[in-house]
Image (cartoon, helix red, strand yellow):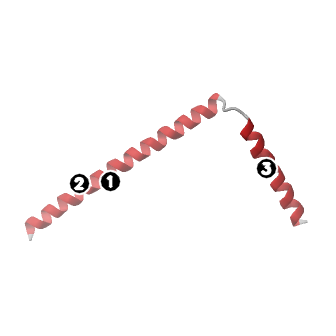
């Protein structure tokens, strides 16, 4: 019984993936991909900015520490 359910699920999943691969992307899907790319790009820029700020703070802390020694 479990094997039959698993086989049916696998068959349906394979069919669904196969059918979805055949369809062209519509305007909503293209817009969604553009939005995903924009959000990912913005996230990368924010991550870079926070890394740079963290590095600058660390350097400033090192300079203060050197002057107090």
Q: CA distance from mark 1 to mark 2?
A: 9 Å
Q: Quadrant of residue 63?
A: bottom left
Looking at the image, tell me whether mark 1 or mark 3 is earlier in sequence order.
3
22 or 27: which is nearer to us? Answer: 22
Q: Say the numbered circle drawn on residue 16.
A: none
**Residue at coordinates 66% horizontally, 32% vertically from top-left?**
25
Q: CA distance from mark 1 to mark 3?
A: 43 Å
Which quadrant of the rendered structure holds the N terminus? bottom right
28 or 15: which is nearer to us? Answer: 15
Mark 2 secondary-structure assignment: helix
Mark 3 neighbour class, 10 Å CA radius: few under 14, some 14 to 19, many 20 or more: few
Which residue carries the number 2 mark? Answer: 56
Which residue carries the number 1 mark? Answer: 51
The image shows residue 49 at horizontal and vertical percentages of 32, 48
Viewer-side label of 2, 3? 3
Viewer-side label of 1, 3? 3
């Amino acid at each position: 019984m479990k094997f039959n359910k698993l086989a049916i699920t696998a068959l349906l999943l394979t069919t669904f993936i196969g059918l979805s691969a055949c369809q062209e992307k519509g305007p909503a899907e293209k817009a969604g991909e553009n939005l995903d790319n924009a959000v990912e790009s913005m996230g990368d820029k924010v991550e870079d900015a926070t890394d740079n700020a963290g590095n600058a703070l660390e350097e400033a802390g090192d300079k203060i520490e050197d002057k107090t020694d």
